[in-house]
Image (tube, rainbow, N blue to C red):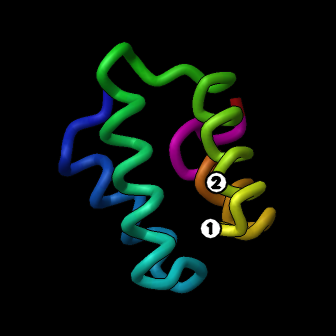
Amino acid sequence: TLSDREIDEALFKLRDSLDFKEREHVKALLKEARGGGLYREELHKKLAKLRAEYKISEGDRAAIEEVIFGNN
């Protein structure tokens, strides 16, 4: 699971692409998702939902997955 520090580090890496509101949405999503362990498919679905709600862009979605999971 992701610690608060790891979440903050991931968001810091995305500071140029996410505005304050987007960062808050993503931070809340990551904190919620870590409860049962963070799996790529689960995160992908949750990020896709944020994208569908126009809370993040498609580029942001891909960047967040890259920061969290790398090239795996």
What is the quadrant of the C terminus in the image? top right
Residue 30: image quadrant is top left
Residue denoted by label 1? 55
- Percent x, y for residue 11? 40, 64
The residue wearing badge 2 is 50
Magenta segment, which residues? 67-71
Q: Which quarter of the figure has residue 69?
A: top right
Residue 6 place in picture, x, y as percent: 28, 47
At 45% from the left edge and 61% from the top edge, which residue is drawn? 25
Residue drawn at (35%, 35%) of the image = 32
Q: Is 70 in the magenta?
A: yes
Going by the numbered disc 1, the residue's amino acid type is Lys
The residue drawn where x is 34% and y is 27% is 34
Left or right placement of residue 18 versus residue 49 in this view: left
Q: Residue at x 36, y 14 (%)?
A: 36
Kind of residue at badge 2: Leu
Label 2 secondary element: helix
For the view shown, which residue lies furthest in the front direction? 53
10 Å crowding of disc 1: few (<14), some (14-19), many (20+): some
* Upstream in sequence: badge 2 or badge 1: 2
Picture quarter with the N terminus:
top left
